[in-house]
Image: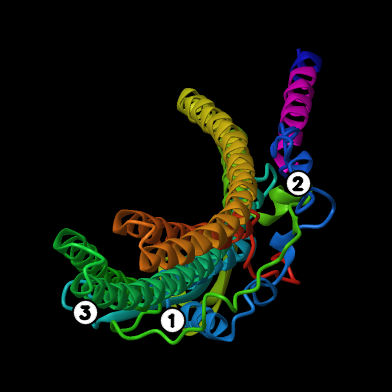
Amino acid sequence: MKRITLYMICGIALTLSLNSCHIYKKYQRPDVATEGLFRDTVSLTDTLAADDQNIGNLPWEEIFTDPALQELIRAGLEKNSDLQSAMLQVEAAQANFRAARLAFLPALNLAPQGSVSSFDGSKATWTYNVPVVASWEIDIFGRLLNSKRNAQTALKQTKAYAQAVRTQIISAIANGYYTLLMLDKQLEITEETSRLWNQSVETMRSMKLAGMLNEAAVVQGEANSYMIAASIPALRRQIRETENALSTLLYQAPQSIKRGTFESQNLPDILHVGVPVDMLSNRPDVQAAELSLASAYYSTNIARSALYPNLVISGSAGWTNSAGSAIVNPGKILLSAAASLTQPIFNRGSNLARLKAAKAQQEIAAINFQQTILNAGKEVSNALYQYQSYKEAHEQRVQQVASLEKAVEYTESLMKLGTSTYLEVLTAQQSLLSAQLSEIADSYQCMVSVVSLYHALGGGREIEEQSTK
């Protein structure tokens, strides 16, 4: 009988040992699908490249070289309220991680006690205990270890969130800045066109007096002049609203934004996107999704460790004058030690249920991780193709503007000679203005596509040289 009992104990111990081995393993990234995330962007044009380089690894100062824009980005990274809140979350996670590391150390508490008693009117008797109580949980089955790793993962996740906020701020400021430059240029062209239209109206009035045009042509010219002039206040309103939005990003009151010119912008001509595996280490949202999976993995291990015994060693040391029924003065040294081993029995079912729930959450986190990677690939693919399409459109638009400028010049000359009508001049000038505004919009979209690609590749993040251990 004793031999059977010994075999059972050894079998249980062996089973616990084998089942608990998984608890000590660190998280390892599962296999994820990354092939073809960017589609066939390499074949689109020579300006797009997918190789071992990645513009997302470049500092934002090398992408956005405009001094005024760099000044705005620095101010945004220093003052933006969202980024400040994210950094405070990092500090809170750091404190939680330190607390998890300290859980491995014994807990020490000073627990002084005192009492006074008197029996049948006798002299009061004072007793006291001044012990220092220590309690130390021996982490046999990895509960504390996985709690520490979970806290470390949470810290990394908050840092990834802060990095995501940082990249978003850089992109938002750059987009707002380029929007301002586009509106400035459109306002400049519209004002110049309005000025030329006013001159044309004066010319048409002189030609009417000379009998070369009728009143209908002059009135039509005036109407178009007013139409162009009416679009100027709307552009100025958009400029003010964009400046106010940028000021909010910079955590300051609405004010005028110092800026350069639309023509002076210089963005990279060759856009390297790297290989899909680079995205896993660059994009903060992908990092956060994987860290969420790692956290779920460690939470599963914590739930699994609840199925195994819990060993706690406790003890106390101090002074006391209470020796059972006697009281001694001065007090004597008090020493005690104890150990307790707790094995869940009746609550094993609830612990198994918690483990099953933790495994389900881990599977959900794995699905979310894969979906985040797919979304990241979609964003990169979209940004690459947008840049290519707007670049091609801009090249064609430049030629269109050049042709329309000649058309306006020719029709105006012909009208002065009496061989062309005011309608032809009107049509040519309207087409030119529309093409000029579209050319600026296409060039702006090229800039925005570079910003979107830089953001999609995790650009603008701070690269830490030291990792938390």
Neighbours of disc 1 within 10 Å: few (<14), some (14-19), many (20+): some
Q: Position of residue 149 (x, y in %)?
A: 64, 53
Q: Earlier in the sequence, mark 3 or mark 1?
A: 1
Distance, label 1 to label 2, CA atoms, is 40 Å
Residue 422, percent across and down? 30, 59
Few, some or many C-alpha atoms within 10 Å of disc 2 (few <14, some 14-19, many ≥20)?
A: few
Residue 228 image offset from top left, x and y in percent: 27, 66
Q: Is residue 94 magenta?
A: no
How far is mark 2 from mark 3, CA to CA?
A: 103 Å
What stretch of residues is rendered in magenta? 6-25
Sooner in the amino-acid sequence: mark 1 or mark 2: 2
Mark 3 sits on what residue? 122
Q: Is residue 374 above or below residue 257?
A: above
- Determine the residue positioned at 21% across, 74% down: 205
Q: Seen in the image, is 228 located left or right of residue 219? A: right
Q: How many marks?
A: 3
Residue behind mark 1: 79
Q: Secondary structure at mark 1?
A: helix
Q: Amino acid at mark 3?
A: Ser
Q: CA distance from mark 3 to mark 1?
A: 73 Å
Residue carrying label 2: 45
Q: Locate residue 21: give its quadrant.
A: top right
Q: Amino acid at mark 2?
A: Thr
* Quadrant, the C terminus: bottom right
| Outermost residue, right side | 52
